[in-house]
Amino acid sequence: MSLVQSVDNVALLPAYLAAGTAVLVLLVDLLAARAAATVAVAALGAAGTALGAALVGAAGERRTFCVGADCSWLWTGRAALVAVVIALLTLGVLALSGPLLRAGRVPVGEYCFLLACAMTGGVVLGAAGDLITLVVALETLTLPLYVLVGLRRGSLAGAEAAVTFFVVSVVATTITLLGAALLYAVTGTLHLDRLGAAFDAAGDGLLDLPLTTVAVALVVAGLAFKVAAVPFHAWAPATYDGAPLPVAAYLSTASKLGGVVALLAVVQRALPAGVTGPVLALLAVLTMTVGNLVALRQRRTVRLLAWSSVAQAGYILAPLGALALAGGRTADARAGAYAAAVAYTVFFVLLELAAFAAVVALRPADGDGGTLADLRGAARRHPWVGGAFALALIGLAGLPPGLAGLFAKVTVVRALLAGHAGWLALVVALNAVLGLAYYLRLAATLYAAPGAVAARPARIVVVALGVATALAVVLGFAPQLVLDVAAR
């Protein structure tokens, strides 16, 4: 085996573009000292990164930083998709940040530089081929967010949120690194594909070692912090609510996407599905159930969106939990489970960004998300923004005409049924009904008259059950009947 490391600069082009954006933002802020120019450079850099990632991805799979067959950088179609979505999310958050930056309580240069650094981490994360690259990329995505959460001058809530986020995230990173070290002690490698091959070759002998179980549990637990999965979720609502609204939007979308990508990488390619499957299934059930139940009682807008994003993480984890029941790391099981998780994540982050964009538009400049009562009748005063907000909420709930959210939930349920995890599909369906309750309640609040009495959660749940039943008949049984007739 050759010990000469190969370097493919074309494969690294998206990372160069993202990192170059951060450097250019610093230079423009230093030399021009004009806020508009700094923001324009950051926006152009994010757009260029998305375009570069798409072009490199279209050229086919590329590998670099390879020693023999082990590569630390794998630029595949999924890596390109992650990079494009991260760059577009960064561009979207920059667009949402206009009122915050014009208010003057946030330094423009530092703000744009930190966003560009976080974007760089997200771009690298999708192409990580070993645990060290993956953890470094995930921390490059996360570290700037500590500062961004508390960057607003004179905000005690922001400072408290930043400290909470920092402490919890550092603990999560430590746990992940300890698990990676134990995996190296057990297998002698940190490359994801080689780890998977080692577990496949060793069979149950390697899995029977207590050290292996501890290592896998630590890695999964550490990454579960990043996606705010229950019971590792407590930091999310307080951090989201204390951060500036555009930063909360970035946390709920780009940061969540990064955590999901990292978890997908290790579960799909490195860790034994027989061990991770049941753990992830349990985490999925707890996450979606706790997130939805607590979201029902929220009165603050951002906290409701935060708890809903916790529940959405459960839907994302569900296909991974079904993987063990689908026959382990077989090709068909991987294709169905991971495609469902990736598709759901992409649709979720886009709809979540749209929801936060509407909140930014409806709230005062440099304000927080306020309470649900503050949004009462907002769609009457601002029809277009209110309509877009309601459509995003309906999409997150998985109802038509929010076809993106509907498609995502149907994809997850199909993957669970294909993986012989009907019980988990039932849990997802029941939790989707709970989600309907608070999403519909918030959407109804937007169109309520100023003096109207808010509907009780129990009443909304009953309505949601009726809507869900009707949808089950139309979208579930009817197509199945057609298929049965065609089969005859």
Image (cartoon, rainbow, N blue to C red):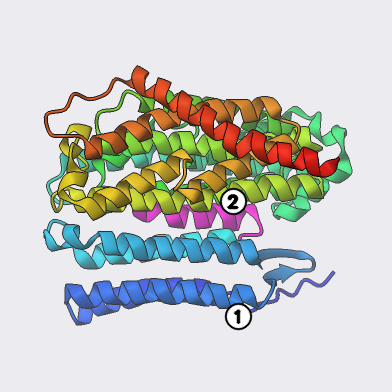
- The answer to whether residue 158 is above or below residue 30 is above
Question: Based on the displayed image, in which of its 4 quarters is residue 35 positioned?
Answer: bottom left
- The answer to whether residue 65 is above or below residue 250 is below
Q: Residue furthest top?
A: 458
Q: Nearer the viewer, residue 265 or 179?
A: 265
What residue is at 13 percent from the left and 63 percent from the top?
102
Q: Which segment is the magenta one?
A: 127-147
N-terminal of the two: label 2 or label 1? 1
- 10 Å neighbourhood of mark 2: few (<14), some, or many (≥20)? many
The stretch drawn in magenta includes residue 107: no
What residue is at 79 percent from the left and 48 percent from the top?
332
Residue 93 point in image, percent of width and height: 32, 59
Residue 188 visible here = no
Residue 126 visible here = yes
Residue 170 point in image, percent of width and height: 43, 41
What residue is at 80 percent from the left and 33 percent from the top?
207
Q: Which residue is mark 1?
A: 10
Residue 214 point in image, percent of width and height: 67, 31
**In the image, is 12 to the left or to the right of 296?**
right
Mark 2–mark 1 contact, CB under 8 Å? no
**In the image, is 26 to the left or to the right of 18?**
left
Q: Which residue is mark 2?
A: 342
Q: Is the stretch drawn in magenta largely helix, strand or loop?
A: helix
**Kind of residue sitting beneath label 1:** Val
